[in-house]
Each structure stands twice: as structure tokens, then as C-alpha cells.
Amino acid sequence: MRRLRRNTAALAAIGALAIGAVAPLGAAAAAPAPVVKAALPLPADHSPAVLVSKMTGPKSVSATDTRWRVTGTDLGIMWDNGHGEILTALGDTFGDWGGPGGGGGDWRSNVLLRSTDTDLSDGMTFDSAVEDVPGHAGEIIPSLKINGEEITTIPTAGIAVGERQYLAFMSVRQWGPPGEWDTNFSRIAYSDDNGETWNSTDGPQWTNTADGQHPFQMVAFERHDGYVYMFGTPNGRLGAAHVARVPEAQLLDKSAYSYWNGSSWVIGDDTAAAPIVPPNVAELSVQYSEHTGGWLMTYLDENLDIVLRTAPSPEGPWSERQRLASFADYPGLYGGYIHPWSDGGDLYFALSQWDPYNVYLMRAEIDENGAVVNPNLIQNGGFERAADGTMPAPWACTGNCGIDTNHAWAHGGSKQGWMRSNAGWIDIHQDVAVEPNTTYTLTGFVVTGGTPAAGSIGVRELGAGAATIAEASFEAVGAYTRYSVTFHSGNRTAVQAFVGSHLNGDRWVQIDDLSLVKAKEQLPGLTVSVTSDPALGTDVVRDDVVTYTVTAATDSAGPEAVELAVDLAGLVDDATLNPASVSASIGAAVLDGSTLRWADAIPAGETLTITFAATVRRDAYRADSQLVVTTDASAERAILTSCEGCAHTLTAVHYDPRPPRPEFPDKPGKPEKPGKPDKP
């Protein structure tokens, strides 16, 4: 049998590992019972995409600030170099960044990082950079850095054809008001040594028009069917999208480009290009998707949201917009460049934020028609919608908590949730509507300080008792660490997501960028229950025989490998187990010391029943007087959805065999004196 899946699933974390436990006595049990209420519907401007990791700057998974002096940067234009690497071109980059926005010392107009990371589910790491000196990412496309002449050169697209790398960039003459700038031209640079050195002067160039409306000043590349397609917009963020194409082998020959005029491809005349998507289209990225069999386009629109359109062909028709990430959740967002290795419905893209002027890896899910599905169900997961320092609904607090506004403290953006106290239990929580019988994953970033203590991130029931469904534990977390908990909703229509901590001294916990989404792999649920005769909570006496019944079942369409471990240590110190009473309806239960173990497959539609009996000893009430049976469950695929009665306690009390004393009636009182007869 393969290694079994823990009942809360393994914690996916960068940094210290921890495993949660499904138990009614979990960390959240100390919290006051939440009020049962309906989870709030998602707002109209909700962001379906989830933040996976920080790609650049402080707190990034690759620590680009200390490894290559990439402290503040933006964009993140990615392409496959054809040899198992993703090359990522970044825009204006600062080693000494003070923020917000672009600016600071050690300025480079652009840098290039490389990645071989094929598992994007926990973030994107970088392996190397194009360096000018060791430990310092160098500028790959030079610029004059003279305002009004050429202030900078910004990469906009990259592609590999054969052994050569191509990088389109725009020569920015000057920055204007927000969302506006003027370019001199766009040009294609090329490299034959995997991006180490670039020829940025001899490639084809598209000079801007006097009115600043040339349609290919900022471009996106994609290869398909022997062509490289070049999608373009004018400078700034106010223009429409256009498309051109060129045979792969002629990418550096400007005369070989054809432009879509709305009805046909016109060779050599860029003025013939007609809009394929209306304004406003900015920081455009395009990919041909094997998953949908069509084309995907992401960009920043006039609402300052990152949106997605789809089309059957490069020239269109392009669908209506679908929001991926909202300005309300990611203030100052832009970019939205697709990762080339997005597949199977996972759409990964690089999102930039003006404050803290860095790049984040985001993930959305699309179906085979290109529709955005399975959105993040956590509202305001990055706390950026908070209007002040108080915790905004639908978030709520147990104990002392609030919102900080400081990009140096936040993981993403400029805000994060905090909790702090010195005794008891504190948490931040949100009620979330879920679908029954569905597997979900809760993810969040956590950092702690002060006196170390047990904490957890997880989901629990609503209402009295607030039993924990699944959680991942942490203690002292010195830097933002990503924790994930996979759980099965069972028959529930709502759960409460929480991050909390017990306290044994002054302690603070900060959380940021939480998400709750349907898991890519939908797994069956496992239900377990433990009952006894006499029933749970009953007092027992010497010589009583207690019969226990453990049941387990899955909702799988096929057999599921399951393991049960029934800890009898708290029972056999007060009672004598009858080995002959142990039986199982499927397979065999084996006594291993003081643990009763069962490991086998439960067939679809069947219920495993394990029974055993124990006799209460005569001196039980003199020991700890508690008959405790604790049951744990795990499975190869199935996730534990409930474990009713798995922490099971009966109490042994003193038994006096003498019959009770008879009750004697009270002594009779004196008879009442007869009254005098009434006078006639």
C-alpha cells in the first residue's frame, strides 16, 4: 500500500512543515462558539484569481533582493527558451528601493531572470540571473536615462525560435500622467547565448507616429502553426489591440510582417492594422491554449482590472471580458503576463503592484471553453479593502485584532491582518459558503512574533462547539510562510476559515493573501463514528461491560484504502479488554499493544464496523476514573469529513453494593383540635 494521506492532507509550505489534525478538540475548540449565519455572497468586483507567491523583492520565494539586488521591479514577461527554462524580463529595477512605485538607487531599465521551476502550485522560483557582477542582475537593454529623449527601455514580449531568443522592448521618451507615456519606437532585440548578451540595435523597429498612436509600440508574442503572432497597442494604457504575423524564420525581417486589416492579412503595411479589441488595452499578454483549443488574452482594462478574453483565432472574434484580478483587491495592479507553462485549466500569470512595486505569481482556473471557474471563495483575502485599522466584514475576530497599512509588514500589497494578546485564544475568521461533498484547499501566509505558542490555520464548523474540520499547525514563524490545508466539505454548505493561536505570553500573528478554492483533484470523503453501550457520557461502575462500535465509510465510487487506529491506553488502565470480542465486518482488526489497528480497503457503498468490549475493573474509580477511547483515521485518497465520537469518554464511579436504607415516614403530628360548633 502506498503511503496514506493524512486526514487533513499534507501541508504544502515553504519553510517549516507541520501536519494538522482533525479532532473535535482542535486548537479552535477553545474559541467562543461563532454565531451561525449565512456566508456573504461574493461582491461584484471580487477577484477569482488567487495569489500563489511573491516572485520578486523582499519576502519573495527566491529572495531576489539579496541574491541579485532586485528589490523593487515590475512586469515579469515570461517565455520558454526552448531548453526547459522560463526567461523572465523585468522592467525598471532598483536595488535600493524606497517606494511606493518605481524609484530609488541602483536603477537598471531592465533585468533578466531564469527559472526551471515546473511546479507552480507553490510558487515560482528563479535559478539564475544575467549578472554584470556576481550577485547583481545587470541591465540587458541599455537606455539613455534622459527624460524627454529616452528615459528608459522597457521589455514588453519575449519568444524563442530555434536557438535564438527575441525580446521586444519600447523606448520610452518620457513618462506622463498616470497611465500615459510617450515612446520613441518599439524594437526587437535578439540573443544567441540564452540572454547573456543582446543585440538591441539591429532588429526591426516600429517608429511611433507624431500623434503617439502607432499600434505596435507595446507588443505580445506567440508562436503557432509556423508563424510568430505579434499583438500590439499604442503607447500608454488608452489604446486598442491589433495583430500582425510573420513566418518564424523571418522574425527580424520587418518587410515580412502581415497586418490584420479587419478582413485579411496585408503584408508590409502597419498602418493597415485594424483594432481587434477596443480600448483600453494595456500590458497585453497572449497565449495559444491547448486546453481550450483557442487563444487567451490578458490585459489591464479601463477599470484597472486584469481581465481575460478568448478567441478561436488570433484575429478574433474576441469574447467579452472576464475579470481575473480586481483593483479593489490588488490596488495599483498592472501587468498580467501569462506563464507559458500554464496548462490543464491552470492559468498562471505575473501581476505587478505599484506598492510594493514587485511581481506576484497568480493563478486562475478556466474550463475548456475558456470560462473562469472555481474562484477564490475568501473575500478580501489580502485585507486591501479595509478602510481603516479595524477588521472589515466578512472578517471577524476573536480577541484583539486589526489591520496594518505598511508594505514592509504585508506579504502582498500594503495591508495585512494582525492579532495580538498575551493569554487565551485569539483568531481571525470568515464564514465561507461551500458546496457539499467537495474537496477544497485553504491557503494563507503567516508570520508570528513574541512568545512562541501553538497556532493553526484551518476550517471549522459553524455554530456551537465549532469543531475543527482540518488544520495545519505552526508555532514560531519568523518570515511569511505559505500554509495549505485540503479538506472535504462532507454534507456542509458553509465552513469557517480561521487563523488563530493559543497564548502563553505576549504574541502577535500576521496573516495575508488567503484563498479558499476547489481542489484540482476532487477526492472522496471518509466518515467515521464511535459509539458505546452504555452511551457516551454515561457513568459506569465495576463489572459493567462496555461494548464499543467503530464505523467507517467513504462516498467513493470504488474501493478506498483506509487505516484506523483506536487508542485504548485510556481504556485499559481502568477496564479489561476482552480480546475475543474484537471483530470487524471487513478484514481483520489487530491489537497492537494498547492500539487496535485496521488497515484494508472499504468497498464502495459498504460500511466497515469494528466492535470490541471491555469490563470495568473494581478499582476503576480509584484510578483516573476515565475510560477514554481515541480514534484516528487516514486514507490513501479519501479525506476525513467527520469523526463523530472519536474522542470518547465514560466516567467510572464508586459502586456501593449495600442496599439503600429504607425511607421512614415522618413522625405523626398532634391531631388538630376540633373547632367549636357554630352558634345556631
Image (cartoon, rainbow, N blue to C red):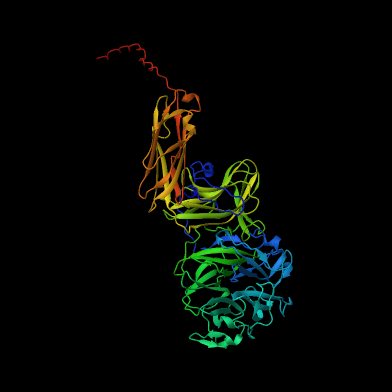
> In the rendered image, which quarter is residue 329 located in?
bottom right
Residue 33, x across and y down, in percent: 49, 44
The residue lying furthest to the left in this view is: 680
Closer to the camera in the image, 646 or 523: 523
Residue at horizontal 54%, vertical 55%? 443
Out of 518 and 400, give the one closest to the viewer.
Answer: 518
Q: Nearer the viewer, residue 467 or 248?
A: 248
Residue 239 lies, in percent from the top left, at: 57, 79
Percent across and percent down for residue 269 are: 57, 88
Q: Is residue 31 at least partly visible in the picture?
A: no
Image vertical order of residue 672 relative to residue 509, above or below? above
Give above or below for 161 relative to 488. below
Tell me the quadrant of the picture where the C terminus can be found: top left
Q: What residue sits 55% from the left and 51% below the top?
A: 11
Residue found farthest to the front: 1
Side of 665 relative to 284 (left or right):
left
Near-viewer residue (586 or 457): 586
Q: How many marks?
A: 0
Q: Quadrant of residue 411?
A: bottom right
Residue 278 percent across, percent down from the top left: 52, 78
The answer to whether residue 425 of the structure is visible from this angle is yes
